[in-house]
Image (cartoon, grey):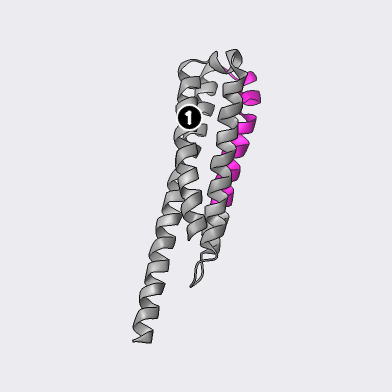
Amino acid sequence: MKVMKIAQMILRAAFVLVLILGIGFWITPALPAESPALKGVHMLLGIIVVLSLWTIGLAQGFVKGGGNFGLAIGTFLVGLLVAIVGLWQESWKGSAGMGTVELINTIHLLLGLIAIGFGEMVVARTKRLAKANANADVSVKA
């Protein structure tokens, strides 16, 4: 459970920072070209979000009473989609019109929101499962 709590806190912190930078890039489209270091920080934080999500997905599988294989696969797929869209979005934007650029940005933002929501949901579910198992152990011993 401790690994999951740490991964959750890292996921939250990285998400807030990546969201702030992403909104800054969206508001000022020339910013990534003017400051490639900020773009690199944004990408690094995005990778941290994905790795934290994957850690949560794996950690829930080791909870006493058994985790959910579907949730582990779900966290992996959501993280993979965020990473794919994030890494390829610049090349997709290069060959697209303005409306398509906004669509790609929106999809990337929505996938990020899904990632944080999915991570929070998995942690909450796992905590409930661990608490239920602990209560069952106490009632069995009594």
Residue 21: image x %, image y %?
A: 49, 26
Residue 66: image x %, image y %?
A: 51, 70
Q: Main secondary structure of the magenta part?
A: helix
Please tell me which residue is depicted at 57% across the width and 22% down the height of the picture.
38
Determine if residue 94 is in view: yes
Q: Nearer the viewer, residue 137 or 80?
A: 137
**Tag 1, which secondary structure?**
helix
Residue 53: image x %, image y %?
A: 53, 48
Q: Nearer the viewer, residue 69 or 136?
A: 136
Please tell me which residue is depicted at 54% across the width and 64% down the height of the picture.
61
- Asked whether 115 falls inside the magenta stretch, the response is no
Magenta residues, start to end: 75-97
Mark 1 is on which residue type?
Thr
How many C-alpha atoms fall within 10 Å of the one at disc 1: few (<14), some, or many (≥20)?
few
Residue 139: image x %, image y %?
A: 34, 82
Q: Nearer the viewer, residue 90 or 30?
A: 30
